[in-house]
Image (tube, coloured by chain):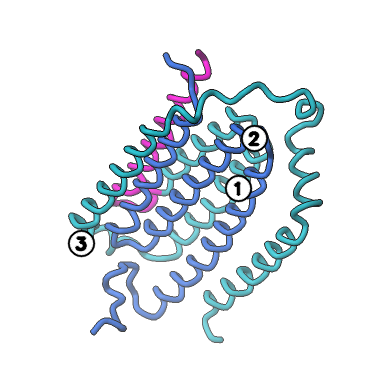
């Protein structure tokens, strides 16, 4: 087997990013859309760690910690919004929430 | 050699978990696939000598965020949603656009792959400290202000999610 280079990690992270993007764009269930956003943020983190290892410098890992912080805040607020939405409209499907659509 | 073996094991976990996450009908199955995916990502961190982030990933993501997701899945009634159509009307256009972006990314990655060889062995100065110590030194020195801003962000998120989930404001 060929040795693992940084390019392997970049390819893996790009693939994970694309999977997450497909999830965000095509799913109707809001819970799974939020999970797909987590996938995208993890793809970003793989990238940051790969370059942190490549340059032998911890700045990339610091950046990844801030990305994880953002992911936590986003998940908490997003799920809070989801609960409020379910209480008011009794649905978790994204395309049934079309009050602002003309 | 073992490096490559573990990379492919974790890669299969990550990509397989990701694909199952976005294709399952039942949201609980999606959440469990996402846990598998996140554990694979944690393994990739460990392979790149980011031990602190490996621990953070396991504790925070698998232990924290996923429990939050499972709570919400139990709290919100998803049985009706599981019986309906899972993908929306724009799925073919979305797949086409994602395929275009993916082709672009992989084309340029293929052209530039020579720039990223195997990472060099660490310089002698780096090895004297552990990974967590290095992160602490940089995080509480150079990045102290962003760290404090992140704590304010978390406070805002806590207050915001409580307000969102409250019955009457």
Q: To which residue does mark 3 refer?
A: B90
The cyan chain is B
Which disc, if any, is residue B50?
2
Which residue is depicted at the point 28% across and 42% down?
A: B103
The blue chain is A
Write down the chain letter for disc 3.
B
Which residue is depicted at the point 47% across and 52% down?
A: A38
Instruction: Determine if marks 1 and 2 fall on one subunit.
Output: no
Q: Report the Cα–Cα distance between label 1 and label 2.
A: 11 Å
In the image, residue B143 sits, relative to residue B77, either above or below, namely above
Dominant secondary structure (helix, strand or loop) of the stretch shown in magenta: helix
* Secondary-structure class at tag 2: loop
Write down the chain letter for disc 1.
A
Q: Report the Cα–Cα distance between label 2 and label 3.
A: 39 Å
Q: Earlier in the sequence, mark 2 or mark 3?
A: 2
Closer-to-camera residue (B158/B54): B54
In the image, residue B88 sits, relative to residue A20, either above or below, namely below
Which disc, if any, is residue B30?
none
Which residue is depicted at the point 43% across and 55% down?
A: A37
Write down the chain letter for disc 2.
B
Q: Position of residue B106 (x, y in %)?
A: 34, 38
Q: To which residue does mark 1 refer?
A: A64
Q: Position of residue A59 (x, y in %)?
A: 67, 44
Q: Is residue B122 magenta?
A: no
User: Callout 1: 10 Å neighbours few (<14), some, many (20+)?
Assistant: many
């Amino acid at each position: 087997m060929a040795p693992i280079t940084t390019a392997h990690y970049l390819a893996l992270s790009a693939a994970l990013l694309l999977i997450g993007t497909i999830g965000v764009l095509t799913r109707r269930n809001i819970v799974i859309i939020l999970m797909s956003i987590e996938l995208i943020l993890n793809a970003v983190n793989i990238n940051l760690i790969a370059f942190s290892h490549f340059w032998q410098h911890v700045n990339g890992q610091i950046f990844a910690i801030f990305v994880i912080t953002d992911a936590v805040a986003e998940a908490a607020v997003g799920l809070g919004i989801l609960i409020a939405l379910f209480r008011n409209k009794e649905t978790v499907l994204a395309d049934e929430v079309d009050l602002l659509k003309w | 050699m073992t490096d490559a073996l573990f990379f492919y094991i974790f890669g299969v976990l990550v990509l397989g978990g990701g694909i199952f996450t976005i294709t399952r009908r039942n949201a609980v199955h999606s959440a469990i696939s996402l846990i598998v995916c996140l554990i694979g990502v944690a393994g990739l961190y460990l392979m790149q000598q980011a031990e602190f982030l490996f621990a953070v990933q396991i504790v925070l993501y698998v232990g924290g965020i996923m429990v939050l997701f499972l709570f919400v899945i139990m709290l919100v009634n998803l049985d009706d949603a599981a019986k309906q159509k899972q993908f929306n009307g724009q799925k073919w256009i979305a797949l086409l656009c994602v395929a275009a972006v993916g082709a672009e990314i992989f084309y340029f990655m293929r052209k530039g792959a020579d720039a990223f060889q195997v990472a060099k062995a660490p310089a002698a100065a780096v090895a004297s400290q552990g990974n967590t110590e290095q992160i602490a030194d940089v995080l509480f020195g150079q990045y102290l202000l962003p760290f404090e801003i992140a704590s304010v962000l978390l406070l805002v998120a806590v207050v915001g999610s409580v307000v969102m989930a409250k019955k009457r404001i």
